[in-house]
Structure formats: C-alpha cells, structure tokens
Amino acid sequence: MKALRFLRHPLIESAVLLILLSLLYLRGIDRIDFHRDESHWVATSAYFEAALDADFIQPEWMTTNELSPGLKKWFRSKVPTGLGSLEPPNDTWGTNYFTLTQPPVARYIIAIGRRLRGYTVQDLNPPWRFRVSDSENVAAGNMPSEGLLHSARATMAVVSIASGMILFTVVSASAGSTAGWIFIVLYAGSPYLLIHLRRAMGDPSLLLFTCLAMLTGMLALHTWEKTRERTWPLFWLALMGGCAGLAGASKLNGLGLAGAGVALGWLIALYPKGFATRSERLTFAFAASAVVMTTTAIAFIAVNPFLYPHPWARTRAMFLLRISEMSSQSQNPEWGLSGLEQRLAVIPRRIFEDHALIHSGWINALLGSVGLIYLVRSAWQWLVGKGSSPASPALLAVGCVSVLPALTTPLDWDRYYLFPIVFLSSLIAIGLGRILTGIYRRFRPASPPS
C-alpha cells in the first residue's frame, strides 16, 4: 500500500504515465499502413514556411488547380462575389484546392516536427493524385520518403501522448485515479487509436486542441467555484475559445467546441452562489458567450492567411467545399451511409464492437452507460453546488459537441469514429472505475482500532 501511495504522487504518476504512453506510441511507427491522405498532409506542411517567409517560393503543385470544372461552376453560383476568382493567383495563399480543403494548423505541426529532424521544403513530396494508380504516384515521387514520413508520424505521436495525459487528468479529476488509469489502458492499448493517432494527418492535432479546450473549460469552472471572481473564469473561457479556434484550424469540425465553451459559461451563470440578481447572471452568461466566440474567431483566422481578405466568405467556402466533397464521396456504395436504417445498423457496430478495444457491444454499452449516468449526475451535482468535480461538466460538454457531429457523418470511414471511440473509452473507464471503487469500499478490511 505504501508503494501505491508513492506512485500516486503527482510527479511520479505523471512520469510513469509519460513513459508508458511513449513506449507504446513512439514504437512501431513505421509499421502503420500508409494512408494516401498522409501524402497530402506532409506535402502541404509547406504552408508553414509560406506563413513565415514573405519570399517563399511555392512548389509547382501549389499553383495547380485541382477543382473540377463542374465544381468551379458550382462554386461561382454559391460563393459570394467577395471571394474572388477560383482560379488560383500567383499568391500562395490564394483561392485554390489546397487552401480550401483544409485549414493549416495540423500542417504547421507536421512542419515543426520535420524541421526539427532537418527536413525542408525541398525534401517534400508532391501531393498524392487520386485519379491515377498507386504505382504511378510512387513513380512520380508523391510518396513521402521513409524518413520524412517517420518524422511526421512521430510528431503526431508526441501530440497524441500529450492528449492522453490531458484526458487522464480530466477523467481522474471527474471519477478518481482508478478511472484515469483504466482510461490509459484503453487509450494506449487500442489498435484503432494507435493507428489513427499516429498517422501524419489532421486528427491528432484536432484531438489535442479538443483536450486543451476541455482542460481550460474545467479550470474556468474550478476557479469560479473556488474564488467567485468573475475575471478568472472569463480568462479560462477565453483560452478555451482560443483552443476551439485552433481545433477548427486543424479540422473544421473543431469549431463546434465554441458551443461547449458557451455552455460552460452559462453553467457558471446558473451556479447557485456568486450572483446577487438574475440580471447579473444574464450579463455574465452573455459576456462569457461573447468572449468564447470572439477568441474562437480570432484564433481560427489569425493562423490562416488565406482567410485574411474575406474571413466570413472564405470560411463559408471551405465548409461548402467539404460538404460538396462528402456528398460526392457518399455516393460510393463502399463508403456511403444512406438512410436511418443503415446508420442504425452500421454506426453502433463500428463504435461499440469493431473499433473498441474489447469487441463486445453489450459490455461496452453497459459500462459506457454506467459512466454516462455517473458523469451526468456528477455534472448536475456541480451545477447545484453539491461539491462534485468541475471536470464532469467540462468532459460532458466537450464530449457532446465532439461526438454528435461524428454520428451524423454520411461516410463510413474509420477515422470519422475517432471522437466517439475516445469518449466512449472515457465513459467505459469512468463506469468501470466507479464499479471497482464501490466494490473496494464495500469489502475493504476495517481499519484496526487505534
């Protein structure tokens, strides 16, 4: 028992956690199956140099218009005239397929990792061409070199280790250290997560900023609970908005995290202590909402020079292009999910069986339900001032806005289930952790009389 108490010291616990995650996430990176989208993410990491260097010389492929004639015509009918021509100008940050298809933060992170390993723009591959065969792409040099791909993947593995440590902190704060360590077993032992959180793509970056948004949201609730000072919760909510903006600048669906920040601001306003009048509550709630939305927008725009000329119009264009692409991709019978009946048949099976660490739907559903009930109850107890952890409402709010969009996807792609799998793992860990804690308390030996 003394050894266990020693391990529970925060520094020792963090060190053990870091070593465990590093051993599992940094080993075997080269054995992950190559995904053709990784070629695009690695190639477009050149936008990091483009953002830093006013004299950046763009690779030839950056000026190549990848939009089909039909899509260009459709865009001209949908996008406001302020957007300008769809034909990419000589400017690197002009309107072209690469600036429209993805925001740049994940590209920046990949670039930082490869630059630390000595890889420059001159070492980058051109992006994969999906209309020609794999062999033609390899022959054309569109496959990243072994070392370049390894450096990009290792960077994303480090990002995912950081995400795991933040999730451990939040789950432990919500339901105890037993739940936290169970989560780490699920997070580090999942073949699904070990693939998708180490590929050189946008998902690890999106998860990191989602976790940071959750952590800052928890701190906003915590500081309000402890101090009743309005400045500090607004400060942490401002940071949460910034994290939401960077999540959206990793992949567009990350912008939904702003909704979680707004919800947490309203929870603070509804907290039973700290406001004298209803007017004060409403004033704080609207102020918190404005702070979150403003910092989200600032962070989202600031990191993406493509948005500077017409932020609203060009953001709208990015969403329209993604919707159009998903609509087209969903026509493929191997990918598309058509109708409610097919969704109900496929999506629960993917989440609770196929991609879960334990391929038992009823076990995962049962433990996940126990965890969800505990989380909702704990969040409610915090709201009514009964002393539960502020981690619970933060985890619940961020989980809802992250998971629900994934459940409406028209595409049955493995990586689109990332957030449902991560948050189901959290719920399973919380559920199993509370069950084991309850059993231990029920049967632990009585303390000897002093």
Image (cartoon, rainbow, N blue to C red):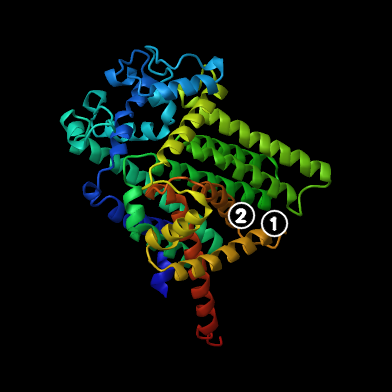
Q: Is residue 374 above or below residue 111?
A: below
Find numbered disc 2 in the image and state the secondary structure of the residue it sits on.
helix
Q: Residue at x 42, y 30 (%)?
A: 101
Which three-letter amino acid code belongs to the residue tagged 2? Pro
Q: Find the distance from the CA under tag 1 to the CA under tag 2.
A: 8 Å
Find numbered disc 1 in the image and state the secondary structure of the residue it sits on.
helix
Which sits in the foreground, 269 or 350? 350
Q: Residue at x 39, y 25 (%)?
A: 97
Which sits in the foreground, 353 or 5? 353
Q: Which quadrant holds the C terminus?
A: bottom right
Disc assigned to residue 393 = 2
Q: Are marks 1 and 2 in contact (CB under 8 Å)?
A: yes
> Can residue 176 be seen?
no
Near mark 1 (Cα within 10 A), the count class, few <14, some 14-19 or many ≥20, is: many
* Image spot of residue 399 (x, y percent): 54, 52
Q: How many marks?
A: 2
Residue at image mark 1: 383
